[in-house]
Structure formats: C-alpha cells, structure tokens
Amino acid sequence: MTSDGFQYDAAGVDTRKARSGLEALSRSIRDTLSFRDDHPFGRPATGFGYYANVLEMPQGGGLAIATDGVGTKILIAEKTGCYDTVPIDMIAMNVNDLICVGADPFALVDYIAVGRVDEEVFEALGRGLREGARQSGVTIPGGEIAQVKELLQGEGPTEGFDLVGTAVGWVPMDEVNLGASVQPGDHVLGLKSSGLHSNGYTLARRVLLEDGALSLDAELPDLGRTLGEELLEPTRIYVPHARALAREGLRPHALLHITGDGYCNLNRVQADVGFILDGLPSPPPIFQRIQKMGNVPPEEMHSVFNMGIGFCIVVGDEDLSRSLDVLRSLGEDPLVLGHATEEHPNEVVMPQVGLVGRKDRFHREG
C-alpha cells in the first residue's frame, strides 16, 4: 500500500519487469521473422505487438495465429472446484485476438499441464472446451496433456494445472486489419464485458480474498451472486459480432480486444491518431468493489482491468448507424464511447476520470 493506493506490483505482478523481459526475449526471436524469406509461403506479415500475427499463404491468403492462457483465474477454479468455465476463457482470449486482425477463427489446439490427472476435472474441462468452441465456431482437432507435478503448485485434485491454447484463423492478405485506416472523427463503439474476463486476477485476489478476507462462497448483494460465481464468469467471445459485421459488408477501421492495459489497447492501432473517450459507462460493481476495498487509484484500475468494456470497434461516419443496427440485432447494447482525434496522437484521453493513457499505462492528467 502506498499513499496513492494499492498498486499491481504490490500484488506480485511487476508489469515493468514483464515488459523488459519481453524485450530481452524479442531481441533474439525477431531474427526468426526472416527465416522464411526464401520460401514461397509462411512469411510473417505483421510483426510483433498487434494481437495476432498473420503468415502469408499461397494465392493471397493469410493464416492468423495467436496463443494465450487463463492466468491466475485458474486458482479460483481450483478453490471452488468449478473447472468448466476457464476453458471458455482460454478460447475467448485466443479467438478474440484473432478477429482483431480481421481473421475468421476456425481451429484451436490446447495444452493442459497437471500435477495429476483427475477424470472428473478433465470431464469438466472437456465440457468447457466444447462450449467455448461452440460459441466461437471453431474445431479442436487435437491437443496435449503433460503430467509435470514437479513444476506445479496448486490446489485441488489435479495438484495444480495450467491451460493454454493456440488458435488459427483465415484472412485474405488484402483484408488484414491493423488499425491503419483509422481516421480522426471515427467513432469508438464498445461492447460490454462480463466482468474481469481473464485479466487482473492477481490484484483482484489480493484485494478481495487476502487483504479483504472475503470468502468465495459469500453472497454479495452488490454482485447479486457469490464472489466465486462473479470471479469465474467466463470471458465473452466476440467472434459472432465480427462475423455479423462482415456478413453485412462492414469493414471496421479497427477491432480491439480490451484485455490487460485496459483502454490503452486502443494505442495499438497503426495510425497516427489518438482517442478521446468521453462516453464511458460506470464500471460494473465488481470493479467498484475492488477499487474501494483496495483503495486502488483510478489510473491503476484502468491500466489493469477492462472496466466493463471487453471489445472496441472503430468505424467511420458512413458505417456508424449500420454497425449499431447489426450489433443490436445480436441482442447487444453497443455504446458509443468516443472518437479518434489528431490532437492527441498515440494517447487515450478520458476526461470523465481525468486520465491519459500513453503506451500501455494511464496517468493522471496534468
């Protein structure tokens, strides 16, 4: 705890060291991007840093690829004995990244590391994998199970487990979307999240369970259910929304999965613009509870959590009305969060909360 409130690194996640570690790793693996230069296909076309990479394939096709896991949300599954939701999270984290580059996801393979195989747990994991695949319209043609008890420390019958996946999608190379076509005045649409999704759980667990001494089976009136049920609510899958827009011939200027770094994910677009978000909704109760119980500063909350919006779609004036209609036809309640601007390049300005996001962190304005 500091005079400015609780920080993420105090909970055990040092995001600055993570960035420096990633850069150290990237210095070597960037060289591999040229290893296919003399081959007719398989060359990476999008570099690092934009949700998913796209590999050039024959006849103008592109194979998009992404990999991700669930993080410490798995610890909540172990503590509650509920294992059939985190597989949905894992699939969501992958397929939601693929649609950001304009790809249509079609397959995913999983990797499950456990201390010990437990049939009931694996049956529950299987149910979750099936449901996540159903929601996103992908197949799971294979995967891997590793029994590595010496590497894991956890709770429950598996004696610890981890779950990650790699997903692939297809996109014509001339339709790859890296946000380069975003223009000043474009509108930022927001699709609601279902809660924390799969980010910030180390901070959430520290504030709610450790320092706050709340029980996962505690019924909390502001949440309308138990804390465990809230924390295990699966990450929403936004693939149907992207597909519906594509069917109507709509080509958003950018699609952005709002994960760790919150609205700073908008800074990923490869256009010389910034964003003013002056139509933000009130954060759902779980975020308000974390902020209040942990005295977490607003800039830290917005740098760690999605704050109630799980996906953003940037569209021009000409597509605003139709895009809203398509999203509403899916039962969605899209919000117009703000607009792109040339006045604050590479920044996300949020006047309602007095914050400015640069790169991947928010700061107090002024």
Image (cartoon, helix red, strand yellow):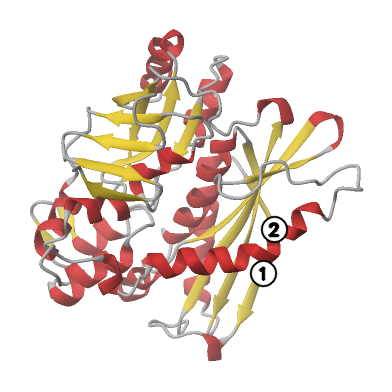
State which quarter of the image contains the N terminus. bottom left
Which mark is on residue 235?
Answer: none
Check disc 2 and give the amino acid type: Arg
Q: Is residue 54 left or right of residue 101?
A: right
Residue drawn 33% across and 37% down?
Answer: 348
Marks 1 and 2, how far apart in space?
A: 27 Å
**What residue would you read off at disc 2?**
30
Q: Position of residue 69 (x, y in %)?
A: 51, 62
* Residue 45, quarter of the rendered image: top right
In this picture, residue 206 sits left or right of residue 54? left
Disc 2 packing (10 Å; few <14; some 14–19; many ≥20): few
Relative to residue 89, is residue 208 depicted above or below?
Answer: below
The image quarter containing residue 46 is top right
Query: Residue tagged by mark 1?
Result: 144
Residues 306 and 77: in front is 306
Q: Nearer the viewer, residue 58 or 328?
A: 58
| Residue that protrudes farthest toward the top in the picture | 318
Q: Residue at x 52, y 69 (%)?
A: 21
Q: Is residue 189 above or below residue 146?
A: above
> Is residue 269 among the parts visible in the rendering?
yes
- What residue lies at 43% left-to-right and 11% top-to-bottom? 322
